[in-house]
Image: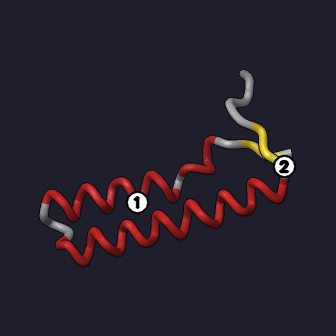
Amino acid sequence: MTDAATLSERQYRLLDTASKLLGLGLVALGLEAGGSTPTGFALAVVGALCAMLTVFLTHE
């Protein structure tokens, strides 16, 4: 199986941190909008997906 993307250690660390902060912010906005509302739920799901973005990337 080939890797979809390969990043340097520094690039991976920066992308990992940025995606987790973005994800956390979106989840917080979703909770602020109301976790049981469609908007709040959608923001929380997108935030969780952003936070897990780097799971599918590899670094050298």
Judged from the image, the secondary structure of the residue bearing numbered disc 2 is loop
Residue at (18% x, 60% y) in the render: 39
| Colouring of the image | secondary structure
Kindly indicate the quadrant of the structure image that contains residue 1.
Answer: top right
Characterize the local packing of mark 1: few (<14), some (14-19) or many (20 or more) Cα atoms within 10 angstroms: many
**Side of 60 where 33 appears, left or right:** left
Q: Position of residue 2 (x, y in %)?
A: 74, 23
Alpha-carbon distance for marks 2 and 1?
A: 24 Å
Q: Which of the numbered marks, if any, corresponds to residue 5?
A: none
Mark 2 belongs to which amino acid? Ser
**Side of 2 where 43 appears, left or right:** left
Residue at (56% x, 60% y) in the render: 19
First-in-chain label (2 vs 1) = 2
**Side of 7 where 47 appears, left or right:** left
Q: Position of residue 14 (x, y in %)?
A: 71, 62
Q: Position of residue 36 (x, y in %)?
A: 14, 66
Pointer 2: what residue? 8
Residue found farthest to the top? 1
Number of marks drawn = 2
- Image: 19 above or below 49: below
Mark 1 belongs to which amino acid? Gly
Pointer 1: what residue? 47
Front residue of 30/1: it is 30
- Image: 21 above or below 38: below
- Image: 30 above or below 60: below
Front residue of 58/22: it is 22
Residue found farthest to the bottom? 32
Q: Position of residue 32 (x, y in %)?
A: 24, 78
Pointers 2 and 1 in contact (C-beta within 8 Å): no
Judged from the image, the secondary structure of the residue bearing numbered disc 1 is helix
